[in-house]
Amino acid sequence: MKTKNLVLIALLLGIGTVLSFVLPFFFAGMKPDILLTMMFLSILLYPEKKHVLVIGLAAGILSGIITTFPGGFVPNIIDKLITAFVALALLTAMRKLSQPVVRAAILTAVGTIVSGTVFLTAALIIVSLPAPFAALFATVVIPATILNTILMVIIYPIIQSILKRSNFEPFQKTV
């Protein structure tokens, strides 16, 4: 992995961390995870297993550090690692889809739902939930899915354009 690729991944995950940290609460002390959008963007740029492992682990640790969910550190790591590899599998399955923005939007929507489900399930098993699973899913995961998907549709073409003009490599290997 080249240093400039690591720097880009770190920059994207850092931006996602800050945005997730400053976002207001939605329900029962939980809020949407904008870091997911940046994790998916990083996976879109570097869709290789070794990159996805690093991206998922880094996103999980960062998300765990800023979580406001009691005992949410470990569920965040579990969630991001599983979600990162599900996203890679989904991206590989959608490789024939010709519209990159549509592919990014589908990846983000499905990935956010997977992430929310895995996080809530892991939290339920490890520490318990502050509200019923269905209530948290409906009031946090669904709005986060909508927000993350809209954000990806806006950000992805901008990042794609910037990287093409700046002579970066990611789009040579994009699935």
Image (cartoon, rainbow, N blue to C red):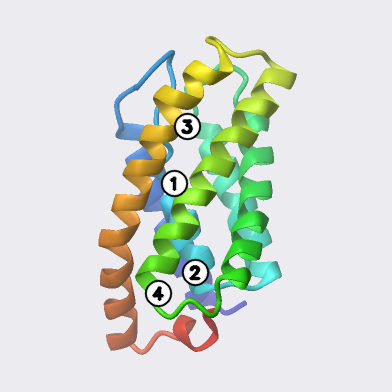
- Badge 3 marks a residue whose secondary structure is helix
Describe the element under mark 2 as helix, strand or loop: helix
On the image, the x and y values in percent for residue 155 come to 29, 62
Residue 161 position within the rendered picture, expressed as x and y whole percent measured from the top left: 27, 79
Q: Residues within 10 Å of mark 3 (few under 14, many from 20)?
A: some
Q: Residue at x 62, y 55 (%)?
A: 84
Mark pair 4, 1: CA separation: 20 Å
Q: Residue furthest front?
A: 97
User: Which is more N-terminal, label 3 or label 1?
Assistant: 1
Give the total of numbered labels.
4
Give the Cα separation between the discs numbered 4 and 3: 31 Å
Which badge, 3 or 2, comes first in the chain's sequence?
2
At a point 28% along the width and 78% down the height, the residue shown is: 162
Looking at the image, is mark 3 or mark 2 nearer the viewer? 2
> Label 2, on which residue?
44
Q: Is residue 84 left or right of residue 62?
A: right
Amino acid under disc 2:
Leu
At label 3, which amino acid type do we have? Ile
Hey, what amino acid is under mark 1?
Answer: Leu
Q: Nearer the viewer, mark 1 or mark 2?
A: 2
Circle 3 residue: 66
Q: Is residue 90 above or below residue 135?
A: below
Residue at 60%, 25% (x, y): give it: 72
Residue tagged 4: 100
* Quarter of the rendering occupied by the N terminus: bottom right
